[in-house]
Amino acid sequence: MELELVDYALEELRWGERTALNGKSLSISVADLEKQIEGLSHGIRIDYRLARPGESTRIVHVLDTVLPIAKSSGSSLTFPGFDGPAELVGTGRTTRITNLLVTVAGRFPHPELMTPIEKPREGIIDMAGVGAPYSYGSDYFHLVLSLTADSSVSNASFDQSLRPIALRCARFLAQAEKTGGEPERNTVALNQVEERLPKVVLLYQVQSQLACARTFYYGEEVSRTLPTFVHPAEFFDGALVSGNYKSERKIPTSLHCNNPFIAELLERHGKAMNFLGVILSRGYNDSFEQKRKMGLWVARLARNLGADGAVALMEGTGNGTVDFMQTVKACEDEGIKTVAVLHESNGPKGYERPLVDHPKEADSMISRGNVSEKIYIPPLATVIGGADIDLHLKATHDPRLPFLFDPTIFFGSYGKMGSSGFRAVYQN
Amino acid sequence: MVKVLHYLNQFFAGIGGEEKAGQELLFIPGPVGAGAVIENELKGHGVEYATIACGDNYFHEEEEKAIRAMGAALERFQPDVFLAGPAFNAGRYGLACAKVCSWVRDNWRIPAITGMHEDNPGTQEVGRHVFVIQTGASAAAMRESLQRYTLLVERLLAGNETAVENFRAEHCLSIPRRFTVRSDAPDYVRAVNLLLTKLNGQPYESEIPRVEAKRHPIPNLTGSLTDATVALVTEGGLVPKGNPDRLESSRGSRYFKYSLNGREDLRRGEFEAMHTGYDTSTVDQDPDRIVPLDAMRVLEKARRFKKLHDYYFVTTGTGAMPSKMEEIGAGIAEELASSGIGAVILTAT
């Protein structure tokens, strides 16, 4: 299985009469976007905005970000399972714009009808300043779709609409007419390597509980699937799509299809290791017994693939940590050496127990930093997406004013803190 | 010109002893007590000195008010450096100094300095970047402690970071706490490197230490269940519809009790669950599924126990810090114990 990537990177993003990529400059026509999503946005008004890395801009109410990817060969579509029957992906050729995101922002039309667990958590992206290394997407260009639904739109239909709107815009942008620039070409493949190299899998646990806190694989909720093997190339084609609005802890759709852990393991494949692929599993199972079994099944699958070692990642926090730790424990019990990556909650003053669950088998953890430490967040010049932000159902705040909060206010912060190289240490 | 604001309790501000522990926060334009010594030592720097003081009881009983009044004092005086204490081994004063300094450092981003003995419980409330000068256990160590305050202020004013760090190493308490720093590589690189080290059989070290959770064994029933009054307690967030007391749906910081008197079961529409950690829709449909009043009434009529307690206790057990949950648990337990409760059914999610 082999996927060819045709990659374009931007240096400039602006509005234009037509949508076209000229060299490293992308111009976008709103009329083109509107045509793409015709029929998908009934009752939903969309404000289109642009944001650029380093700009003094804060994007608020962010629900998801999508990387522009489109198939340029074969009959399948990227983001399979959305827009018609799913076909297998991960082969052929895919065009990507590697530093642009289609960013969906907005509030649900009827929050008063949502149970606490369904309510999206505020997620902001600071494109510059203190918040940038905590904000997923701060180093990307953004086409922001700021959505406002009228009262005729139900919460369920808003949730069901925003994905196809964003995914279609993303496919469309990747297909923009291109002139005067040479793409970078890469191949995603797991070629045969020397037998002596250690065999490694990536354990990839997603959050999938219920509407507004779920993840899709080929359009299907992962809550309804067992742990499964996924080829890295399938990730690059958008086999996983996020429907999770637990903002700070979510893996955005764009991070599923452009994940630095997968990239790093592919990079080391054939050199230091034999990367076997990814095992996708689900956290937030209801009972301890289910969590334990999920761990056992993942370990059994890894064993059958022949893994000697595993890197383990999880989306979520608290509850999901137990599923994750049961997975790490089960792998170690099967003799698969496992390194697990997690954020810590050491409290604002740093003296709380770092993890809610930590069995002795999890003896080689990588830290993403203390997510409950307070940071002083100064304002930025421009705010896109709303006039007030929700400080996690406790208070509202004017995003043009400074505030003191922990990194959980930033979109995708748990993952971003890891990429930014944050970790927690003991300090006096 | 440098402006120093110094926080003292009622005793060290010379307002009075325990009888003045309820004193509200005062702003005094000038140094008082320990402050006068420090001000005198700093004379060469052109110091403008002011003091805020309040009673230890007042601070702890009216913390929000005290902090608000302090914010107003800071707004008015605009200090460059904030001092508190020294508190030596005085627990309530030490806690106040730690909280006040943490608040000032977080919200005003100016240097905040306190001083206390290593056994002072205030050491557990010190935020990041606050200087905690090591002092003796009692005011007998006052003179030496104040010299250290002065020395640190002088080094801060000189802007010599190395000298400040040396001071920290030599004279500040070592209170190990975990905070975020930047490492030399992103998590994905460190994770793969650590795995290869582990696979190669070389020595490796976890970045996250394993801290065992405190074990709380379930106590044995003393006496007979048929003589016991039984209470229902839950962390499932069940509150009367409309959430009259504003129980938080995550990071709960409080608990409440609600009457079960005269009720045979908890009806749909009269209660709802505030909890972001589980799907509350089943509980909203039948609140008895988290606070099992219907089953308890059956058992009560069958005399399996003496009586069901008239109130159930509730908090939200998600997203919160373990130390806060311990505090909430202790509060509920104390109320139950003083109401003569013999057994508890604790429903968790």
Image (cartoon, helix red, strand yellow):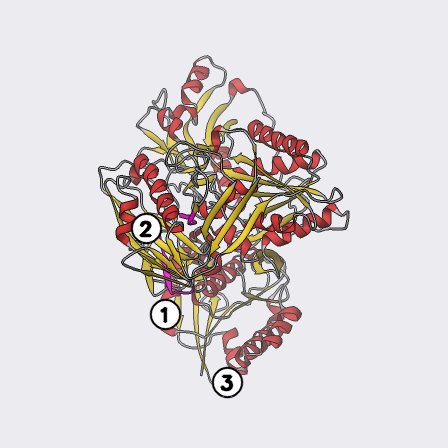
In the image, residue B10 sits, relative to residue B154, either above or below, namely above
Provide residue B149's location: percent of width, then percent of height: 57, 74
In the image, residue A288 sits, relative to residue A426, either above or below, namely above
Kindly indicate the quadrant of the structure image that contains residue A309.
Answer: top right
Q: What secondary structure is found at the residue carrying circle 2?
A: strand
Q: Name the residue under label 2.
A: A145
Give yes or no for residue A406 being in the magenta stretch.
no
Looking at numbered disc 1 in the image, what kind of residue is underneath it? Glu
Q: Is residue B77 visible?
A: yes
Please tell me the numbered disc located at residue B45.
3
Kindly indicate the quadrant of the structure image that contains residue B310.
Answer: top left
Q: Is residue B341 visible?
A: no
Q: What secondary structure is found at the residue carrying circle 1?
A: helix
Q: Are marks 3 and 2 on the same chain?
A: no
| Span colored in magenta | A53-69
Looking at numbered disc 3 in the image, what kind of residue is underneath it? His
User: How far is disc 1 from disc 3 in space, using C-alphas?
Assistant: 23 Å
Residue drawn at the location 36% of the way across and 70% of the way down: B75
Provide residue A232's location: percent of width, then percent of height: 56, 42
Q: Are marks 3 and 2 in contact (CB under 8 Å)?
A: no
| Foreground of the two, B30 or B317 | B317
Residue drawn at the location 66% of the way across and 70% of the way down: B170
In the image, residue B200 sits, relative to residue B310, either above or below, namely below
Q: Mark 1 points at which residue?
A: B75
In the image, residue B157 sits, relative to residue A49, either above or below, namely below
User: How far is disc 3 from disc 2 in space, using C-alphas?
Assistant: 56 Å
